[in-house]
Image: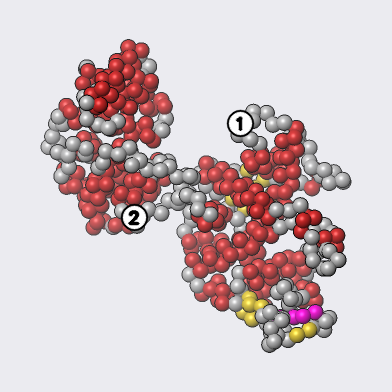
Amino acid sequence: MSAERPSLPPVRLHTEAELARDALSAPLLARAARLARWAGPETRVGAGGELAEAQLPAAAEHLGLADDEDGAAYASEAWRLAVDTGLVDVQDPQDESAPGEGPDGDAEGTVTAGENLALLTGGSPQDVLGIWLDGLDAVHADATAPAFDDFADLVNEDGSVDFDALDWDPETEAEFLDGVLGNLYLLTLAEAGPGAAPVPLPALAASVVVPDDMDEPTDEVLEQVSEAMMRLDDQFRVLEPIGIVEYRPVDETLLSGDGEEPEADDEDVTRYGMVRLTPLGLYGIRERMLEAGVDAPAVGDLADKGADALLDGIAYYPEDAARSEVVLWLGHRGTEGAAQAAAELLAAARGSDGGAPLRRLHCQQALASVGPEAEPAVRAVLDDPELGGLARVWLAERGAADVPVPPESMIFWLAVDTIAAQLDADGDIDELQELVEGLSSGHSGFFDEVWRVDHPATAEVLEAMGRLHRDRKTAKDARKAAFKARSHHRR
């Protein structure tokens, strides 16, 4: 059975230790930890666990934000994260053991250090990242929450909040932001990681608004892109302090006094916002996608798996990612296990299913990383009808002595298997044409013989050769051979 293509290309993540250091230095989590260590029995909180308003100036001063006009807001935001991530525990003011009412008549709870606070300094990198992921979830929820321009207008006579008046669907908002973050993740991988250039906000907004089959966006769609940009501007401002993105906000001078969106013809695209995913952001978004059931592989996932899982797993990886995965897989087995690793790879490469040719191709490439220790295992399969051809190629490439001459049937079988693998891999069309033309011209009467090859993909390969070969006569010969192969295999 052919391996399934992963939904996303594999990501190269930083080590957990590096990611944990990034998490600890994220401004919002760092502030939350400082406030958690600052809090004590005298710290006053409201019924919802929020820091009492009278405490905010002292909290802002502790964070070094006393002179910042937004210092109190930053302190409140950091305190909420400390509560959400378990850095502090707040006892419900309705509990009989709680202090009761404060000086201003509001119910108050008590504050104690949370279990997670000690893990930030004494726990493992996984502990730190687990706390950070909880923080990311909380910040993501904040980023998709509605903006209360005038909260009083939303309160009903009975004191309840009229959420219908907000015209806000939490699931829709979360899906929109997750779609944007998913596209940013893909763009980052396409540019070879978080060191890539930042993405213009208009392009990112367009990626989730403009239909794929629309050549020229309509005025209505362009207006939707502008609206999406302004939503994203607000959301990325909220997300940046948790460390998943580096964000250059929309230039506020582009906004007119009545709050209209910026005009779309300004030459400096950076003024419309630029966003770059950080290494921590790659990790965080991948974790969220995995939790949602998305297949989001990472280089190194297969290091402790069997050879069959390795060859199936790297089937559609980019070449450099596949090579890195193989090196990690071999490194997991150590030098002493190299010979056994080679034997496992060869055993896993066998098969007549649709994915077998590509497994054999990756097996041959993986054996190149094993080194001379693979030779005994390779020589052991010289007479194997499926592996004998690749074994001879491997030995010849290493300049080994006494490599037996392959029978003609094995030469043809290997030619079919090699093209089948390349067709399955969807490789470069020019390289595939060169392979097809090179194999067919390297043996006189190639198409007179190859149709008899007992390989499941013989007819499919010959049809492909008929499409790809640039010489008309040879292409016609390939199509005739494909017809013969289908008739031969139906018997």
In the rendered structure, which amino acid carries the disc numbered 1? Answer: Asp
> Residue 159: x, y in percent?
82, 68
- Mark 1 crowdedness (10 Å alpha carbons): few <14, some 14-19, many ≥20: few
Disc nearer the start of the sequence (2/1): 1
> Residue 86: x, y in percent?
60, 73
Q: Badge 2 is on which residue? A: 305
Residue at the extreme top of the image, as rendered: 473
Q: Nearer the viewer, mark 2 or mark 1?
A: 1
- Mark 2 crowdedness (10 Å alpha carbons): few <14, some 14-19, many ≥20: few
Residue at left offset 30%, top offset 37%:
357
Quick one: quadrant of the C terminus?
A: top left
Can you say whether 355 is above or below 338 in the image?
above
Q: Which residues are magenta?
A: 106-110
In the rendered structure, which amino acid carries the disc numbered 2? Answer: Lys
- What's the distance in space between the residues labelled 2 and 1, CA to CA? 40 Å
Residue at left offset 79%, top offset 42%:
261
> Residue 7: x, y in percent?
48, 44
Q: Is any part of residue 396 visible from this angle? A: no
Q: Badge 1 is on which residue? A: 213
- Main SS, magenta residues: loop
Can you say whether 171 is above or below 314 in the image?
below
* Residue 217 image-quadrant placement: top right
Q: Is any part of residue 430 visible from this angle? A: yes
Residue at left offset 64%, top offset 28%:
215
In magenta segment, residue 107: yes
Locate residue 86 relative to residue 391 in the image: left or right.
Answer: right
Residue at left offset 55%, top offset 71%:
120
Residue 427's disc number: none
